[in-house]
Image (cartoon, rainbow, N blue to C red):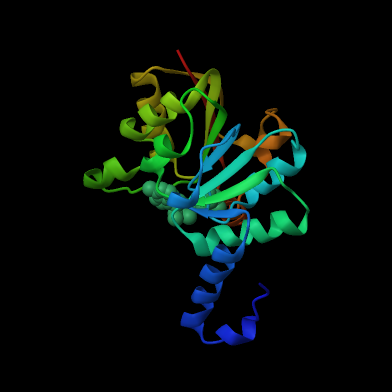
Amino acid sequence: MMLDPNDFIITRKRKKYKFAQFANSPLCFEFDEWRKQPVDIVEIGAGNGLFSVELAERYPERQFVALDVKGDRLQKGAYEAAARGLTNVQFIRARADQVLELFTSASLMAIWVTFPDPFPRERSAGRRLTHPTFLARYGELLRPEGALHLKHDNCNFFHWSLEQFVQKEWYVDELSFDLHESDLPDEYKIQTTYEQRWLSEGLVTNFVRVRKR
Ligand SMILES: C[S@@+](CC[C@H](N)C(=O)[O-])C[C@H]1O[C@@H](n2cnc3c(N)ncnc32)[C@H](O)[C@@H]1O
């Protein structure tokens, strides 16, 4: 069904329009609509998912999923993917703690966690997407040779995450405290929407790839 934005002109309705867009896209799924299927790479807290769209275009033989709790953001990536004719990227509105119900154990080649909310207060540490409770789920989903990638601008959050990795069963495989000045692969340097903003404000991107021991 074609939606007319003019039916949704008031600001509050604009969000409704985006939710309707999400509901209408064949690439978008609510948590309980998703059926387990082969997936290679998942981006968690993907926002609009444009980073996954870029990766999907580079790797047409791999299946991507962008996951976020906000459907109004995800729909943007879904319509961009459709405009580019991509069929290897899908978008799921779900929480990161639900991933074990969405994907098969030991099936993923890679997980990306891109600029997650840092939740700086100590009492909110459990909500950080690199908290050990989330790392255990990611570890369960990755293939033995699979890798978890993290990008972040916030040094405190990034260092805290590094500590969580090394205290648990992960080892650091690739690391940069300034990704865009590093020799790491170009695909890592595809900028997410938040990353574009932070880089334009003079911040740098910290990057780490970790694997299970
Ligand atoms: C700072 S934004 C970064 C968005 C995107 N990765 C980027 O770099 O442009 C963090 C995103 O994580 C999502 N998020 C936060 N907690 C989440 C959770 N528990 N499960 C899934 N998504 C979550 C938010 O909705 C938001 O879109």
Location of residue 125 (image quadrant): top left
Instruction: Give how far across and how far down residue 166 sits, in percent.
Output: 39, 20
- Residue 180 or 11: which is nearer the viewer? 11
Residue in the image at 36% along x and 41% along y:
97
Instruction: Give how far across and how far down residue 180 sits, in percent.
Output: 66, 38
Q: Say if 190 sits above or below 1 in the image.
A: above
The N terminus lies in quadrant: bottom right
Q: Is residue 136 visible?
A: yes
Q: Is residue 117 visible?
A: no
Count every numbered label the image shows and give the total.
0
Residue in the image at 70% along x and 46% along y:
54
Location of residue 25 (image quadrant): bottom right
- Residue 31 or 115: which is nearer the viewer? 31
Instruction: Give how far across and how far down residue 87 sits, in percent.
Output: 72, 47
**Side (left or right) of 15 relative to 78:** left
Q: Say if 86 sits above or below 209 in the image.
A: below
Location of residue 100 (image quadrant): top left
Instruction: Give how far across and how far down residue 171 sits, in percent.
Output: 46, 17
**Side (left or right) of 22 relative to 80:** left
Residue in the image at 49% along x and 22% along y:
106
The C terminus lies in quadrant: top left
Q: Residue furthest left?
A: 123
